[in-house]
Image: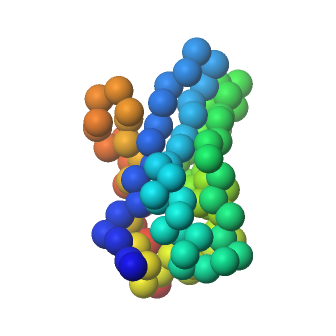
Amino acid sequence: MDMEAIKINVSKQMDGYTFWTLPSTRNLIKSWNPKFSPANTISVKFDIKSEFQFNFGIYAALLGIENQSDLIEKVKEILFVDTQTGAVLHSHSVSA
């Protein structure tokens, strides 16, 4: 089963950000390829916030993928969504 977008939840903590996906999203990703190993959560501390960008490294680690090409034909975009407001903080198109 493919999907339009993978939603990555973003929660602001006292000392940084926490990124997480729902168990159903992790299960779907694992069903695409047994080598994919999604993490439950990833935290980024504020001390590296000045260098922080929503990039491949964040979602690759969270989704357990090695290359963006692993997602091509499976999903169209990655959405980083603020869990407090529901606002999309960043979107990343997955394309060939």
Indicate left or right for 42 with 92 as reference: right
Indicate left or right for 57 with 77 as reference: right
- Quadrant containing the N terminus is bottom left
Q: Is residue 9 above or below residue 92?
A: above
Residue 17: x and y in percent read 56, 30
Indicate left or right for 12 with 65 as reference: left
Residue 68: x and y in percent read 57, 73
Task: Determine if residue 57 is in view.
Answer: no
State the scheme by which the image is colored. rainbow
Q: Is residue 82 above or below residue 64?
A: above
Give me the residue at 47% from left, 37% from top.
10
Give me the residue at 29% from left, 37% from top.
87
Q: Residue furthest top?
A: 14
Could you say which quadrant of the image residue 42 lies in? top right
Residue 9: x and y in percent read 44, 42
Query: Which residue is more in the foreground, 39 or 82?
Result: 39
Give me the residue at 61% from left, 80% from top.
33
Task: Determine if residue 9 is in view.
Answer: yes
Query: Which residue is more in the foreground, 53 or 88?
Result: 88
Residue 91: x and y in percent read 37, 54
Query: Which residue is more in the foreground, 56 or 25?
Result: 25
